[in-house]
Amino acid sequence: MKTLTFIAISLLSGAIAGALIGLINQVIVEPFIDKAIGIETQARINAGKTVDSSEQSQYRIWQKEGEIVAATIMGMSLASLFGVVFAYSRNALPGSNNKRKALTLTGLMFFVLFLIPSLKYPANRQL
């Protein structure tokens, strides 16, 4: 397979995976965020402040659409990074076939890009 074809396939798969994760996030996470925003809005109303529900509704729609776009872009960027690194280091990676080499690179990328930073900079230091 040619290198550019592989990178194009990687970009397409990353876009699909990113769009799927964005849609899954819409179904699983967004109801909790909407509920929290509803509680904050009710607290503002109870405090006597005015709330423009139309503006807030339009802003949330914009945020939700942006979330899917951002997840798609993130998927494409991670997939392009994987595609470029795999295409140029395929011969240097350990493994007997390309599937094992891809899994090795995936494990290394997870370790370097996600696990080490999350251990070094935890999300909540109060735990």
Image: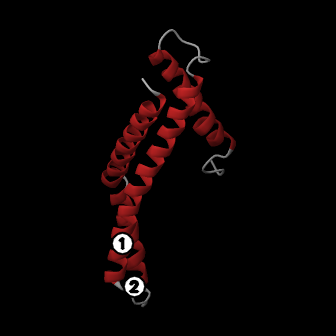
- Residue 41's x, y, as percent? 39, 78
Q: Is residue 101 left or right of residue 15?
A: right
- Residue 67's x, y, as percent? 41, 58
In depth, the one of 112 and 13 nearer the eye is 13
Q: How many marks?
A: 2
Q: Is residue 110 above or below residue 30?
A: above
- Residue 101's x, y, as percent? 52, 18
- Residue 62, disc: none
Q: Which numbered disc flags the more N-terminal residue, 2 or 1?
A: 1
Q: Is residue 11 above or below residue 6?
A: below
Q: Which residue is mark 2?
A: 46
Image quarter in which the N terminus is found: top left
Q: Residues within 10 Å of mark 2 (few under 14, many from 20)?
A: few
**At x 38% / y 45%, what residue is drawn?**
15
The amino acid type of the residue labelled 2 equals: Asn
- Residue 38, disc: 1
- Residue 79's x, y, as percent? 47, 38
Do the CB atoms of the residues marked 2 and 1 lie less than 8 Å apart?
A: no
**At x 66% / y 50%, what residue is drawn?**
125
Residue 29 sits in which quadrant?
Answer: bottom left
Q: Does dot 1 land on a helix, a strand or a loop?
A: helix
Furthest-top residue in this view: 96
Residue 56 sits in which quadrant?
Answer: bottom left
The alpha-carbon separation of the residues under discs 2 and 1 comes to 12 Å
- Display colour scheme: secondary structure
Q: Is residue 52 above or below residue 20?
A: below
Q: Does dot 2 land on a helix, a strand or a loop?
A: helix
The amino acid type of the residue labelled 1 equals: Gly
In depth, the one of 27 and 127 nearer the eye is 27
Camera-side mark, 2 or 1: 1
